[in-house]
Image (tube, rainbow, N blue to C red):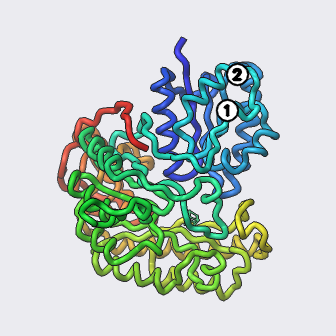
Amino acid sequence: MKLRYYIQTFGCQMNAHDSERMAGMLEALGYSSTAEPAEADVLLMNTCAVRERPEHKLYTELGQLRLLKETKPDLIIGVAGCMAQREADNIRRRVPEVDILLGPRNIHHLPHLIRQAQRTSTRFAGENDGLDLDCDPTPITPVRRTSAVSAYVDVIFGCNFNCTYCAVPSARGREISRRPGEVLDEIRQLSDLGYREVTLLGQTVNAYGHDLGRLETGSRIDFAWLLEQIDAIAPNLRVRYTSPHPMYFNERLIDAIANTGSVCEHLHMPLQSGSNSCLSRMKRTYIIEKYKSIVERVRERIPNVAITTDCIVGFCGETEDEYQETVRAFQEIRFDNAFLFAYSPRHSTPAFDWPDDVPASEKNRRLVQLIDLQREISRDINLDQVGQTVEVLVEGRSAKDAARLSGRTRGNKLVNFAGDMDATPPGSLVNVRTTGGFLWGFSGDKIQTVAAPHAARTVIELVAA
Ligand code: SF4
């Protein structure tokens, strides 16, 4: 009988890629995927601990799974990701039916833990855990990618910063860069397989290489060097990266981004607050003036660059004046888009012990006001770009109108346009003239196909990750 797996993913792109790796390992073990949890023999929840809501959702979902396990005792239930790492004791106590706990640094241990869980009758005594925070996360694993057009590539794991609100360092451990040869081999392979776009992943992706020393030639291995190497071996790929930290953003990196044709004109750089006193309490290690100077230089060197950000309102002790400094920063910088959040305390972070003293209603007011401001700015920026010709990587049919196609610009903006899926399948590059500007992106008309898709093969690749 064919064994099946089901994976539910919460959170960021790092988690999405970890789920692809887990799927690849399960398929290498002979499992096939199912969209129905009730059909699964292995059920994995890949979790996120950044915000409170996904955490609550996990316990609700696990409550459903324990019912499933009553009817299917051989079902293997695993919890992976940041919550598995941070909440191991609570998960064990609250849901003893969980068989496997797998932290983000231990993903490659999945096959071994599955076999162990199949053998052992002692459910969840801790022997099926992969929670070693000092574990080397870089071994080669198979990967089952969810897209035949765009691919994630891990370049650095963990985070050495200690932002006071952030749960990531306690879940993902210290930074470790993948060896450059492995990263470049993977990208060469993706290009040969017909992928059009890669997104380089790391909690602080531009810290890449600080732990790798120098090349034999004496040159430093850093993120700028990596972008130049990728551009040299796969100049036709679109290259994206997330997320850079302002502390590692220097002139050399701006040069590399500006001079490499493959690196897209999109910078997503978390701001988190526009107030220096708040940034200091957050331990973000930069001041707003430094952030703004990076934006200014990037805009000077990279025409048409789209700049997006993340920001938190209502952090511990945030006064109205500090909040207004954030509002002013948004008005001055004019981001193309922003992911905005109200602060919620996460345990085992320094700020967890501080008074969470901005009332919920006030956090909500600030959040709604900043969202409204950002929406107005996004709409205005996109309206200003109506009439331009943009290169669009086709993703498929539009979610809003099945008669139209959609894709993304190099600035990562959504474009819906009239087109024929047979003539312009996913993976095609087309030039589109924008005819309408909206909060979410553009409507437009196709002018011409720039490149047909490669015949991308969906195989399980062996990648170093
Ligand atoms: Fe968290 Fe700060 Fe590291 Fe980002 S840089 S992952 S916010 S500790």
| Amino acid on which disc 2 is placed | Thr
Q: Residues within 10 Å of mark 2 (few under 14, many from 20)?
A: few
Q: Is mark 1 within 8 Å of ligand 1?
A: no
**Residue indicated by mark 1:** 128
Q: Is residue 356 above or below residue 230?
A: below
Is 147 on the left or on the right of 164, as rendered? left
Q: Which SS class for mark 1?
A: loop
- Asked whether the viewer can see residue 420, the reply is no
Q: Is mark 2 within 8 Å of ligand 1?
A: no
Please name whichever residue, 315 or 380, is drawn nearer the observer in this view of the structure.
315
x, y percentage for residue 114? 60, 27
Q: Is residue 58 above or below residue 165?
A: above
Is 94 on the left or on the right of 225, as rendered? right
Q: Are marks 2 and 1 in contact (CB under 8 Å)?
A: yes
Q: Is residue 448 above or below residue 121?
A: below
Quarter holding the N terminus is top right
Question: Which of pointers 2 and 1 lies earlier in the amino acid sequence?
Answer: 2
x, y percentage for residue 312? 62, 71
Q: Which mark is residue 279?
A: none
Please tell me in which quadrant of the rendered image residue 139 appears.
Answer: top left
**Residue indicated by mark 2:** 120
x, y percentage for residue 97? 76, 30
Please name whichever residue, 39 or 435, is drawn nearer the observer in this view of the structure.
39
Q: Which SS class for mark 2?
A: loop
Please tell me in which quadrant of the rendered image residue 308 appears.
Answer: bottom left
Separation of residues labelled 2 and 1 (CA atoms) = 9 Å
Please name whichever residue, 439 or 100, is drawn nearer the observer in this view of the structure.
100
Quarter holding the C terminus is top left
- Asked whether the viewer can see residue 447, the reply is yes
The residue located at (54%, 76%) in the rendering is 373
